[in-house]
Amino acid sequence: MNGTATCDFQPKDYKSDLKPIWCPGCGDFGVLQGIYRALAAIGRPPHEIAFVSGIGCSSRIPGYTTAYGFNSVHGRSLPIAQGIKMANPDLLVLAAGGDGDGFSIGGGHLAHMVRRNMDIAYIVMDNQIYGLTKGQLSPTSHKGLTTCTSRHGSLEEPVNPLLYMLAYGAGFVAQAAPTDLPGMAAIIEAAIRYPGFAFVNIQSPCVTYGMEEQQLKGLKAMQESLEGLGHDSTDRLAAMDLAQHYGRKLHLGVFYRNPEPPPTYGDLVKARQEELSKNALPVERILDLFIKK
Amino acid sequence: MSDQSPAHNLVFGMAGSGGDGIVSAGDSLLQAAAAEGYHGVMTKSFGSQIRGGESSCRVRISTEPILNPGGNLDVAVALNWEDFLKFGAELPVSGNTVVIYEAATLIPPDRIPLVGVVPRQVIPVPMTQMAKDTAGTERAKNTVVLGLIAGWFGIGAVAVMKGIRKKLAKKGEELVEANQRAFDAGRAFAMANPLRVNMNIVPSETKGALKLITDGNDMCAAAAIFAGCRFFGGYPITPSTEIMQFFTDHVWKYGGSVLQAEDEIAGIGAAVGASFAGVKAMTATSGPGLSLKTEMMGLATIAELPLVIVDVQRGGPSTGLPTKNEQSDLFAACFSAHGDVIRPVLAPTCVADTFRITVEAFNIAEYYQTPVIILSDQEISQRKETLDPIDVSQFEIIERLQPNAHDLKDYKRFAQTENFISPISHPGMLGGTYLASGIEHTEGGAPTNSGTVHARMNDKRTRKFDPLKDRKDLFEVLGNPSAPLAMVAWGSVAGVCREALQMALDEGLNVKLMVPYLLYPVAEGAYREFFASVRKGLIIEQTHLAQFHKLLRMHLDLPAGVRPLARSGANPFLPGEIVAALHNLLSELQRRHEGKLQPQE
């Protein structure tokens, strides 16, 4: 399980020497702080953590931690994270990226990630824009948004990450924002502790291509805590109902947490290994399988 | 008659409708031959439908080791002509073939639908009727066929029924007895109607010796598990899927796991992740899947992660010929990535050496911290061979270089070392944390935009492979080492060329053959040495563009008389055809030598 505390760690113990290249004011700074805090609260030593990302501004994040990091290729953090988890189930495995990385190029992996229910926490820094390539349309950009690839306004509806993940059957779905740092850190911690695949959408504004200061204020105004609404986070249908407000209302908190988490993929793998190893030929004799008597 | 005396070597081809049990009969025949000490190769071919339709198999049996399924058939068995004729290229009939066919087709022996060929002998046999009469079901007609073969060619009189008994034991003694009657009836028919020429195969000298029977895909997967591979990520694609199937059957037993991913990219991605986590990992695919995996191959190259990728080639481009053989993924295997990349490419030539090549691929991947491609092909991957047992204790297993306490003090994952290979840590290792990345990085792993660092890292990532080119054990030279005539062939085509070489030597030609197991990086030295004595030569390959010929020419000057003998799949090269091409080269050489300098090329 991801969340076994072993030692006392401070958030700074997870901070690497690399200086973030993000623009001043980027929401991802806050997300990084939230991750440091969550990891310290859990207390797994950095060398027992594997932190995988794809490509994009947000995907730089593993390099800013002292964990084993993997800054891979665009959209493929989840397959790599799965391979790591299957190869060594004892590791705490995190995946992170942006909305383009996760819902466009890597979108095909999400449903299958959920189906397999590996004990991995996936954090998406959702800014509704492509920042690193300097301001193009993203899958979560709202319809009508004018960008350098949609000069006359986008013609497409945005995807709804929360509704997708709930519909796929994810056991843990939450949304957070760096404007509420303690709340966000607590949500990330809960996601990591959830025994199974956990998804956190973080509204992490892009101050360079995404939002004017005015809009940032608007974002704050849209914030509403799910707890304050009295939402029952064990009710998947109620969660789906609330998730429909994505883009219009910024609900923060846990939308859904399966109260009875099913066995993880890792548990199932372990059981199969134990069952089948009883009948194993020594590996030096594996070619005996081809003897026809 | 095939290429050698029929007494030592027989090629059977059988075809019928799906459900006739043709492939099952081929399996029984191969197993019986192995039990009686013969060497054998079996290939099978189907129509493009999933069920029903037509199927065929070809079984070659020999007293000597063989590495190809042979040329023209010695024995053709047609359960019906319509199906048989669909496999014209796979089942070529000649004037030396004995043709056995289902008498119920009511076609007289002199009217069989083989155009332009007069077989040695044509025998109608009422196989279906015999099956009904003896076993009570026409399903037993494949057993009748096996009885005919036992009677006429002396293979499997005891072993076939032993195998059938074992296979059917669970289904009851009644069925076993019924099949015994069908088999006896076939054998009795053969005894009562002897062939015009005695085609009994001579008894094998190794009767009773232990033999294994398997195909290239199963062999590759078993070898991978032996080599320590404990993770497989992949996606089904013909003709590589059996590799994943073998893993799903067996890898759990050794504490490993397998992931049937949602696509090819996720399959290799999971393998990259597993390797990063410190576990030997593999993926397998075929042409179109290799294209999809390309970006991840580049990632594993720059992140210096060990990984084995099997590409079982089929006809391309795109979906191409999914069930037929070709060697045309060579360029893709060597070059498909952006940036400056060297990635070792190894090719087995038969089922037997798939074991060694697969173990070698893991050793190279782990030692050099790199993706390695095993370039297998449909022919090797899906044909069955009889094999002598392999002494696995002779194989060394290499593990990746891990950091020691000193390395971990101020750990630099991508440290520049004398041989360009840096100790590699994995998650869980205290002191070894680093950032693996597809982006250019410093020795410590920090992302960088520095052109100087990039040039130095490119140098590290490419020069580390230099020693590979000096590996003499990854090349084989057969025949007369100083011959002026030469052949170079790789993969399954090398198996055909080995036999062509023997035929040519027997005919007195002064010729040699080079079989490279390492295709890339190109070992210039090995080829220069080989070509030093060569005046005329053939680079023999199943590609349209003569890819291997071009690959060699990129790296070295070939003698002017060396040219490609190249063609697309799916028709296999035949040993006799290659010998004929060698004779042409020889006569060109002789004419030149006599001073009659007519342009020959």
Image (spheres, grey):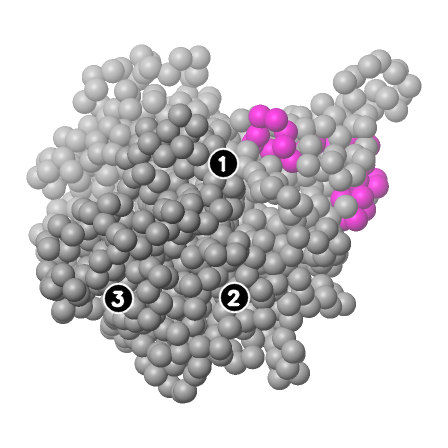
Q: Which mark identifies residue A64? A: 2
Identify which residue is drawn at 35% across, 78% down: A42
Which residue range is magenta in the image? B525-548
Identify which residue is drawn at 44% across, 81% down: A10
The chain under label 3 reads A
Tell whether position B534 is magenta.
Answer: yes
Identify which residue is drawn at 72% across, 51% down: B451
Q: Within 10 angstroms of label 2, few (less than 14), some, or many (20 or more) residues?
A: many
In the figure, B402 relative to B337: above or below?
below
Q: Are marks 2 and 1 in contact (CB under 8 Å)?
A: no
Q: Of discs 3 and 2, which sits in the foreground?
A: 2
Q: Are marks 3 and 1 in contact (CB under 8 Å)?
A: no
Seen from the viewer's position, the closer of residues B368 and B176 is: B368
In the figure, A51 relative to B195: above or below?
below
| Pointer 3 residue | A196
Identify which residue is drawn at 39% across, 65% down: A94
Q: Which structural element holds mark 2?
A: helix
Q: Are marks 3 and 2 in contact (CB under 8 Å)?
A: no
| Pointer 1 residue | B70
Seen from the viewer's position, the closer of residues B548 and A240 is: A240
Q: Which structural element holds mark 1?
A: loop
Q: Is residue B397 left or right of residue B279?
A: right
Image coordinates of residue A169 in percent, x first then y, are: 19, 55
Instruction: Measure how far apart labels 3 and 2 are at the Cα level.
Output: 25 Å
Q: Is residue B321 visible?
A: no
